[in-house]
Image (cartoon, rainbow, N blue to C red):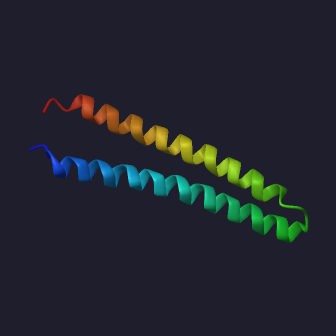
Amino acid sequence: MRPTGTRLALREAYRFSGLGCTFAAAVLLFMAGGWLLDGWLRVTPVFMVIGALVGAVLGSVSIYRRLLVDHDRESEDPK
C-alpha cells in the first residue's frame, strides 16, 4: 500500500532532509580535514577551501546517485 497525502509528504520531507544532511556532512568533513592539514603544514587555509570544494562535489555526486537509484526503484515498481 502506497502512502498518500500527509504520509507521502512527510516521507518525501524526511528523504530530502536526509539528503541535505548528507551533503552538509560531506562538506564539513572534508573542510575539517583540510583545516587540520593546514594547521599541520602551517599554511594559509588553502587545503580547507580545497576540502570544502571536494566535499561539495562528492556530496553532490552522492545525492545524484541516490536520486537515480530511487528513481529507478520507483519506475520498476508497478504499484
The correct choice, above or below, for 36 with respect to 71 in the image is below
- Looking at the picture, how far across and down is residue 5, in whole percent? 15, 46
Q: Is residue 37 left or right of residue 3?
A: right
**At 33% from the left edge and 33% from the top edge, which residue is drawn?**
71
Residue 49 image offset from top left, x and y in percent: 76, 54
Q: Taking 14 as reference, is 75 above or below it? A: above
Please provide percent x and percent y for residue 59: 56, 48
Q: Residue at x 62, y 55 (%)?
A: 27
The image shows a total of numbered marks equal to 0
Q: Is residue 66 above or below residue 43?
A: above
Q: Is residue 70 left or right of residue 53?
A: left
Quadrant, the N terminus:
top left
Q: Is residue 3 above or below residue 36?
A: above
Residue at 13% across / 43% down in the picture? 2
Identified at 76% across, 59% down, the residue is 48
Residue 41 left/right relative to 14: right
On the picture, is 43 further left or further right than 62? right
User: Of 63 and 7, which appears nearest the observer?
Assistant: 7
Q: Quadrant of residue 28?
A: bottom right
